[in-house]
Amino acid sequence: MDKLIIKGGKRLKGEVEISGAKNAALPVIASTLLVQGEHEITRVPDLRDIKTMGRLLENMGAEFHYEPHKAVIATNKIRNLEAPYELVKEMRASVLVLGPMLARFGRAKVSLPGGCAIGARPINLHLMGLERMGAKIELESGYVIASAKRLKGAVIYFDTVTVTGTENLMMAASLAKGVTVLENAAREPEVIDLANALTAMGAKINGAGESIIEIEGVDELRPLTHKVIPDRIETGTFMAIAGITAGDVTIRGCMPEHIKAFLIKLKAAGLKVEETADGVRAVGPARPNAVDIETAPYPGFPTDMQAQFMALMSKAQGTSIITETIFENRFMHVAELRRMGAGISFKGSTATVRGVRKLKGANVMATDLRASASLVVAALGAEGETTIHRVYHLDRGYEKIEEKLTMLGVDVRREKR
Ligand code: EPZ
């Protein structure tokens, strides 16, 4: 397993180009299953999860060609309506093929995603919605077996805001008979991007980005051409890097309006953030101010930025309180940050971060995607050398991370195992 060795303590200066959003590309790729034809999706990030989604579609009979940063997909010969355990266990977002398969073919067999490091992450709300649309759902040996002659429109209320649940049902409803209303729907920019892609295919969707989304089913859709939005979490991660290194980082090709809540907290922490022609410029303070955060569904503070913000706060002047409300176990990075000298403790879903002047480089272990990003942030703000083990977690969500860090003047190298 690869390791990343990072020498910290430098004030970073330079430019970085943001890649396409993983969490927008994945549902958009899955949506191509809704219609036969050839599709072209651009600004698709060169990441492991994208390749896994491609393997999943190929396993179903689609053709999937990827060269950075374009995916060309042909969905004329889908014959295997199954998402096998071997692929789903690698990437829970595989569940996004369930809605499209059921809507277009009336059948689907998808392995239940297991839990993961950050929580149980069930898909009960996805299944509840499909049942309300008339699907028969059976669970057998760890698989969801779903069938429906033709899905019909329904009113679906989500007890909990679910991003991929909203996306799965929006795709299923696009080909259902009648109108579907999703209530307490996710409002993330990635949901809006998917709605824009579905609309380009001929779907009739109103309210994407709001809590109530109305989808009027159509009989058929047309092939897709779509450019994916930039990755707001990668954008936020590089801003946190500017913050912890008292750096001056210009972030190109991003959409800062997608992370307003995060920007408010960054400015409270003392960063100067100014819009540029095609992105933002983030200038870090000598030492960040302590700022409390509480994660929430969009447009609240993103849970996917909690770990990176905690790394920033570990060097703040004062104590900050960090509350995680979305996932039940998303503090795996705390133990690793403590190894670097961070003064963090937590009880349940609330962490207390007593800022220290100096972090020290150490051997640390990545446990999940965003936890590994927080270790990179901390390593850059630490004195000495940090070795991040199991860096495959990082490769899931950050394209060419060491090249981008090198562009900012970082002394970083990857040791392949
Ligand atoms: C999406 O995951 C993202 N992944 C996650 O990003 C992100 O952290 C998460 O949304 C929250 O913003 C993709 O978009 C591919 P949820 P998702 O369904 O859809 C509970 C990353 O770092 N829930 O919004 O799986 C669930 O347990 C990843 O890129 C149910 O109880 O998350 C969680 O507590 C990590 N039943 C909460 O809702 C359900 O049927 C939010 O989960 C579905 C969800």
Image (spheres, rainbow, N blue to C red):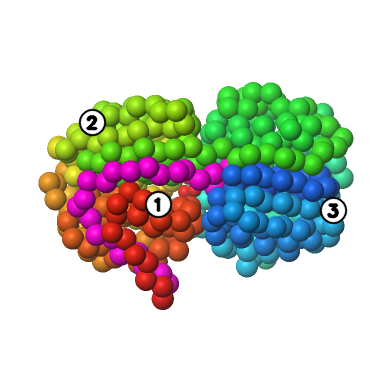
Dot placed on the residue nearer the N-terminal end, 1 or 3? 3
Closer mark to the observer between disc 1 and disc 3: 1
Residue drawn at (85%, 41%) of the image:
150
Residue 339 falls left or right of residue 372: left
100 w.r.t. 153: above or below: below
Q: Quick one: quadrant of the N terminus? A: bottom left
Q: Residue furthest bottom?
A: 417
Residue 11 inside the magenta-drawn segment: yes
Q: Amino acid at mark 1?
A: Lys
Q: Position of residue 375 (x, y in %)?
A: 31, 55
Which residue bears the numbered disc 1? 404
Q: Is residue 132 visible?
A: no
x and y percentages locating residue 272 in the rendered image: 28, 29
Closer to the camera in the image, 406 or 156: 406
Q: Is residue 253 visible?
A: yes
The residue that disc 3 covers is 76
Q: Is residue 219 magenta?
A: no
Checking the image for residue 270, the label placed there is 2
Residue located at (45% from left, 56% from top) = 400
Work out how far the residue at label 1 is from the one at label 2, CA to CA, in angstroms.
Answer: 24 Å
Would you identify the image quadrant in which residue 332 lies? bottom left
Front residue of this view, candidates 21 and 345: 21
Residue 240, x across and y down, in percent: 32, 41
Q: Ligand 1: does it lie within 8 Å of the C-beta at label 2?
A: no
Q: Amino acid at mark 2?
A: Gly
Q: Earlier in the sequence, mark 3 or mark 2?
A: 3
Q: Secondary structure at mark 1?
A: helix
